[in-house]
Amino acid sequence: MSKEIAVPYLRVSTDKQDEQYQLQYIEKFIQEHGWEQGETYKDSGISAYKEKAIRHDFERMLKDAKTQQFKHIVVYDLDRFSRKKAEEVIDLVKKLRLMYGVEVNAVFGDEWRDLVNVINKLPDMGFVGKAIADFIETFIVGIKAHESHTYSKKLSQNVKASKKFQLAKKENRVGRTKKDFTDKENFFIEEMIRLKFSWRKIADTVNKSRIEENKERSQPKQLPIVSYSTIRRVFQKGGVKNDV
């Protein structure tokens, strides 16, 4: 009896090491299942989820699947197969299995791999199998939707933090310490804090003094204007509640 043919599918970066890393796990997976390894399909440096991106070997593999040239597609994990919406990936996996008898197998992939395994067994499980697959499908789609929302939220927070940092960097406010102030400024700032002057008043006093001092300094050695928030961040101590 001839062995079932399994084909590796690789979506890799341009790095040769990435290709070999994925392939070694896929080949081991195929050997452990007693399948015969067929042609390797590979797309390099191509996104799995951009709509305009054309994965030539992926499309060729799907075309070969329709003519049942192999029984199994094996990927490192299902993110390498596709990063499109969960329901789109599930529909494709179902179509391959139910219409062409081709199973998609993931070496890794956690809940995705478990779902695919259920789908692969669907034709042999009857109504109960379909009910289980539908339940897991709904569950996985929910997980992916939550992950997408969480990712978008984190991305938005990171963008805001980056903009805030770039603004602070532009205004030369990053990493300031008391060493960035003269001894005279340190003394007067500490004294004004003790006397409960507002941070704005302290900043105004420091900046007026710097403006006068800069008149006698050459351009490269001039002291920068500082914001009240910078002074507050450097000098504020626990319990100090100076008004802004």
Image: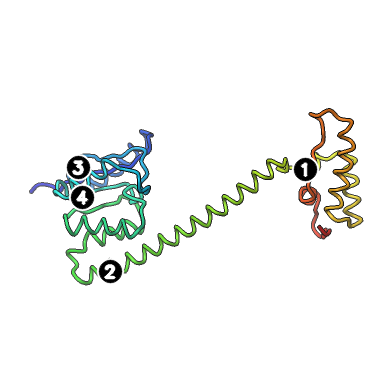
Question: Mark 2 packing: few (<14 Cα in 10 Å), some, or many (20+)?
Answer: some
Q: Earlier in the sequence, mark 4 or mark 2?
A: 4
Check disc 4 and report its element: helix, strand or loop: strand
Residue annotated with mark 4: 72
Judge whether 22 appears above or below 139 on screen.
above
- Residue type at mark 1? Thr
- Between marks 3 and 2, how big is the CA–CA gap? 31 Å
- Residue type at mark 2? Ile
- Between marks 2 and 1, how big is the CA–CA gap? 61 Å
The numbered disc on residue 37 is 3
Snapshot quadrant of residue 96: bottom left
- Between marks 4 and 1, how big is the CA–CA gap? 62 Å
Check disc 2 and report its element: helix, strand or loop: helix
- What residue sits 30% from the left and 42% below the top? 55
- What residue sits 40% from the left and 64% below the top? 142
The image shows residue 15 at horizontal and vertical percentages of: 38, 34
Residue annotated with mark 2: 132
Question: Mark 4 packing: few (<14 Cα in 10 Å), some, or many (20+)?
Answer: many
| Front label number (3 vs 4) | 4
Display coloring = rainbow
Residue annotated with mark 1: 177
**In the picture provided, is 61 more to the left or to the right than 235?**
left
Q: Nearer the viewer, residue 113 or 173?
A: 173
Question: Mark 1 packing: few (<14 Cα in 10 Å), some, or many (20+)?
Answer: few
